[in-house]
Amino acid sequence: MKIIITGGAGFLGQRLAAALLRESSLPFSELILADIQQPPTPMEDPRVHCLALDLTRPGAASQLIDRDCGVLFHLAAIVSSHAESDFDLGMQVNFDATRQLLEAARHNAPAMKFVFTSSLAVFGGKLPSIVTDECAVLPQSSYGAQKALCELLINDYTRKGFVDGRVLRLPTISVRPGKPNKAASSFASGIIREPLHGDPSVCPVSPDLALWLSSPGTVVHNFIHAATLPAAQFGSSRTVNLPGISVTIQQMLQALEAVAGKQVRERVRFVPDETINRIVASWPGNFDISRALALGFSVDENFQQIIRAFMHDEMLRAGG
Amino acid sequence: MKIIITGGAGFLGQRLAAALLRESSLPFSELILADIQQPPTPMEDPRVHCLALDLTRPGAASQLIDRDCGVLFHLAAIVSSHAESDFDLGMQVNFDATRQLLEAARHNAPAMKFVFTSSLAVFGGKLPSIVTDECAVLPQSSYGAQKALCELLINDYTRKGFVDGRVLRLPTISVRPGKPNKAASSFASGIIREPLHGDPSVCPVSPDLALWLSSPGTVVHNFIHAATLPAAQFGSSRTVNLPGISVTIQQMLQALEAVAGKQVRERVRFVPDETINRIVASWPGNFDISRALALGFSVDENFQQIIRAFMHDEMLRAGG
C-alpha cells in the first residue's frame, strides 16, 4: 500500500512524513512526497520517494495516483493572503488541482482514502460564540471559499463511493518553524518564533483577538488518526472541525513571557494591518469540539505547552 | 441594457421572459433567451432574441455575455435525478458552465447582476425542524452539491467585486405545467396536474412527507425582485432561502379534493420509490422566512390558491 503526501516539501508535509515513517499505526510499502519543487527526504528510508510535480498540469494527478495508492494526504495549497491577491492561481491550485486528484482517485484507485486539509477560514460573518458542526460556512476570503468548495466536492465524491474522503478543518497552526509565509495567519507563529530567536516581530491584529490554535505535533497526529478511522464513524458528514485551543494574542504573549521571560516578549510590537485583520478577525475563535473528541482526535493542553514543544523541536533541529 | 436568461426554453425561463416583457420594474432594451435547443419566443416583441447555445462548449459564455449585459438570470441546469445518474454531465452543466458564465461576466461586464437559481437540495442530514440562514448545507445529491458549489463561487465573485451576485434557493415548484421530468421532485407537480387532466398519477413518497413549495408565478415574481434589490440590503451573504409554504403530500391531496373533487384526487396512487424518497426526504420541509420577507420577497397564500392559479393558467393556455 502506497501513501502520497502533496505539499510534501512544506513544513507539515515533512513532519507528517517523518511521523508516518516512525509510527506503525498506518503500515505502508511506499511513501511518495510530491511538491512543486522536489521535497527533501524527511529521513533516510528506502520506502520514501520525493517527486517534483506541478499538480495544476493536466495529467499530473493521474500520474501521481495509481491503483496501489491507499491514502492521499492532500496538503498542497496556496496560502490565504496569496490566494486573496492572486484569485486565479488560488482557484487553480486550491480547487482545480484538488478536483483533478479526486478524479484520478475515482478512476485509478476507487474508494482510496482522501485526507484533505481544510481550514477554519471557511467560516465568517455572523457566528455564534462557539462554532458547531451545524454552522453554515460563509468564507470572507478566496482561500476560505476554495477550501469550502473542496469540502463539498469531497463529501459528494465520498457519498458516490468514488473516494473515501476525510476533511479536516485545521485550526491556525502555531508555532511553525522557519520563515514567515504569505498566510494571513503567519504572525500567529512569528510573534512567538522570532522573539525566541532574538529577533523583533510585528503583530498586525489586536491583543484581544482570540485565535483557534493547534500545535504542529497535534495536527500531524490528527492527520494520521483521520486516515485510520473507520468510515462509518463519521456519520453523515466527512468534514470535521479539528480540536484546538482558544487563546487571545494577549494570552499568547503572556505564555511567551512565562516560558521565556519579559525581555523576549518585549520583542513584539503591535502595528495594525487592516487587510490581515479583516481576514483573521472573520475566523471563529472557539469551537464545540465534542464530535472531534468523540471521534478520537487529540487536542493540545495549553499554549505554554505548545511553546515548550516548539523550543524542544528547535533545539533538536539545531543539534542536528 | 441587455437581460439574458439561460435555460430560456424551460418552463420557468419562458414564464420569466413573458413577465419581463409585460412588467416595467426592470427596463431593458434586449432580452436574450438561450438554451441548448433554440427557445420558442415567449411573445412577439422586437426586444426578444432566442439563441441555441451549449453552455458547456468552451467560449460559449464569452459569446453570450458582452459589456451591454446588465442582468443574467442563470436558470439552466441538469435536474436532480439526472445529475444523480450522470455525475459528469451534472458537474459540467450545473457547475462548470456556471463558472464559465461567472468568468465571462467578470471580464466582459464587471459587476453585472448575476441571479442564480439554487435549491433547497443543498440541505440534508440532521436539520432543525425550521431551517435558518445559519444552517450548514449538507447535500445528499450531486445536484445539491453542484448548486452549493455555485453558491460559494458566486458569493466569492461578489465579495471580490467581479459580479453582483444574487443566489435564490428555490422551494420545490408546484404546480408545473407540461410533462414529468427527471427532477426527483417531478411528482410534486404530477400528483396535481395529471389528475386534473383526467390522468392517473403515482406518488413515490409517503403521504406525511412535508414539502416546501412555491407556485411558478410567485417564484418568477421573486426572480425579478432579486434583480431589482439594492446590493447593500443583502448583508454578508448573497444567498437567500426563498419563501415557500410547508405542505404535506396528504394536505396537497386534500387541497386537490377541495378544489376539484374526490374523483380527481382518487387518480393518485402511492407506489414507494426508494431512490426518489431518499433524495426528497433529505430536503427540509420548513424554513424561517423572516429574512426573505424583510428583503421584500413574496410568498404564496396556501396550496388551494396555488392549484386554482394553475387551473387558471391551463385554461388560458387551452384557450389559445
Image (tube, coloured by chain):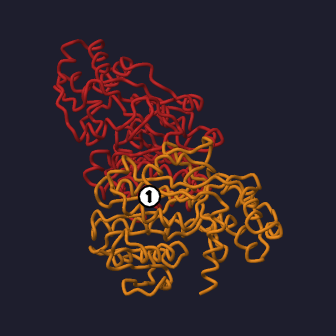
Chain colours: A orange, B red
Most foreground residue, A299 or A12: A299
Q: Residue at x 40, y 84 (%)?
A: A49
Query: Element under label 1?
Result: strand
Within-10-Å neighbours for mark 1: few <14, some 14–19, many 20+: many
Is residue A178 shown above or below A142?
below
**Which residue is located at x 42 percent, y 69 percent?**
A73
* Residue A115 pos. (x, y %): 41, 63
Q: Chain of mark 1?
A: A
B95 lies above or below A25 = above
Q: Is residue A84 left or right of residue B278?
A: right
**In-front residue for pair B109/A30:** A30
Q: Residue at x 38, y 78 (%)?
A: A31
Count of marks placed on residues: 1
In terms of image quadrants, where is residue B16? top left
Residue A209 drawn at (x, y percent): 72, 53
Where, by quadrant of the figure, is residue A306 drawn?
bottom right
**Is residue B193 toward the left or the right of residue A58 in the image?**
left
Question: Tag 1: residue type?
Answer: Val
Residue for badge 1: A167
Left or right? Give the position of B61 relative to B202. Answer: right
Residue A95 or residue A31, whichever sits in front: A31
Whether residue A65 appears in this view of the structure is yes
Q: Position of residue A157 (x, y in %)?
A: 34, 57
Examine the rendering and report whether any part of residue B64 can be seen: no
